[in-house]
Amino acid sequence: MTWQVLNPYDQECIGSVELVDWPQVDRWLDEARALHEDRQARLPAHERIAILQRAIGLMRERAETLAMQIALEGGKPIVDARVETSRAIQSVELCIHELFASGGREIPMDLTQAGAGRKAYTFREPIGPVVAISAFNHPLNLIAHQVGPAVASGCPVLVKPAKDTPLSCKSFVEILYEAGLDERWCRFVPCSNDVAEQMVIDSRTAFFSFIGSARVGWMLRSKLAPGTRLALEHGGAAPVLVDEGVASGKVIPPLLKGGFYHSGQVCVSVQRVFVPRAELPDFAAELAEGAEALTVGDPTKAETQCGPLIRPAEVDRVASWVDAAVQGGARLAAGGKRMGSTLYQPTVLVDPPCDADVSQKEVFGPVVCIYGYDDVDAAIGQANALPYAFQAAVFSDRMSWADYCVETLAASAVMVNDHTAFRVDWMPFAGRRQSGLGTGGIGYTMVDMSEEKMVVVNAPSSVR
């Protein structure tokens, strides 16, 4: 069996990958466990660093090819695909940096009489075989975030890419091989969902890294073998609170970027914007004008700002949600129409019903909702009412007001005077509630993929 990889813009086939069956995955899991348990087979840190350095060099040489591959298989505009490629390179660089900074620590023992005369210290060991399942929306950098830390930490890793975007993952794995990594340490595993589930819940899997839907992530977590550690990254419906009197020039451009970047197919994309009711008409008109000015089309063209959604079915879903919101009383300020089988206009909805799908669920499409508020506490209550909590944002010229919102918003991170989708690859990145479990970010993932071991030495009395 194979996956046919389609260009989401024109639905033309651009490649294919052969699927791996369970007997092969079963052999690879045995191999990964044996590799981890054989301490003589483990790669010393300097060899891992050398491999990652060579991989960085190869990625730099092929940066434009990698970026075009992202645009072709994932539909991300080429200007943003180039940024993703640069971030993926930096992510691998961060893996090396973390190896230099990942030493153990001394544990003080003489704090009580019971510990007197002892010395204690810690060091980190690789946790064991890693299974990583990834998403389509950042097909190179997400793989770098899951596979890079595993290689750097000394863990064998089996990685399943998203069905829609396996080519970038395959390229990254092949670059690691070319850089000198033995294939046993990293296996490219395109496979059916049934095989993927068997691989995840197998007792040989020591750590499970998942980026994808909450429904699938929480289901797989419920089936993990005892002892398997994990990190889940899902999505949300990111809220933005705008204070009264803030100049629109400080707010509208970042909201356009944060809401319509990759056509909204980002887990922390701007989705729900709360604006003082008296300012709502002008704010909505300006945001709608900006949305209508965005260039939608072929992601390989330099002028394109919004590309296609990943599949035609996603356009069907987004269109149905928008239509239902309008029928329920929302005002359509911009967009709201299909532009092709996988293209949908950047859309701005004003005051959609609180029970509409666009208000309750992650849209994962080019839709931004604006709500007027009279009382900031009521707006915060509405922002916090969903079972998701990831990144949020606040725009204000008053730090006291911003601080109050920061303290009261349900979020793992709050951006002040910036959009919700801001991220650098070394910062902690984590969903709360149903939005995820554990913390992403290169250094945090490397901690997850290793275990701390403590040594306590009962030191003999000094010789006089």
Image (cartoon, rainbow, N blue to C red):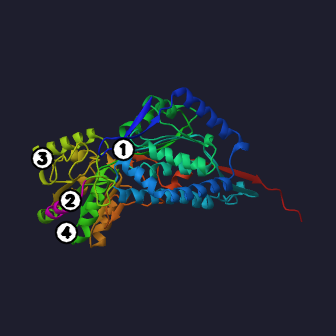
- Residue 245 appearing in the image: yes
Q: Name the residue at 46% across, 60% down.
A: 86
Tell me the kind of residue under disc 3: Val
Write down the quadrant of residue 414 in the picture: bottom left
Image quarter where the C terminus lies is: bottom right
The residue type indicated by label 4 comes to: Glu
Residue on which disc 4 sits: 244
Mark in front: 3 vs 1: 3
Q: What residue did someone put label 3 on?
A: 326
Between residue 392 and residue 76, name the one nearer to us: 76
Instruction: Indicate the amino acid at tag 2.
Output: Ala
Q: In the drawing, what numbered circle is on residue 122?
A: none
| Chief secondary structure of the magenta portion | helix
Q: Residue at x 17, y 56 (%)?
A: 371
Dot 2 or dot 3, earlier in sequence: 2
Q: In x, y percent, where is residue 286? A: 16, 65
Question: Which residue position holds label 1?
Answer: 434
The residue carrying mark 2 is 291
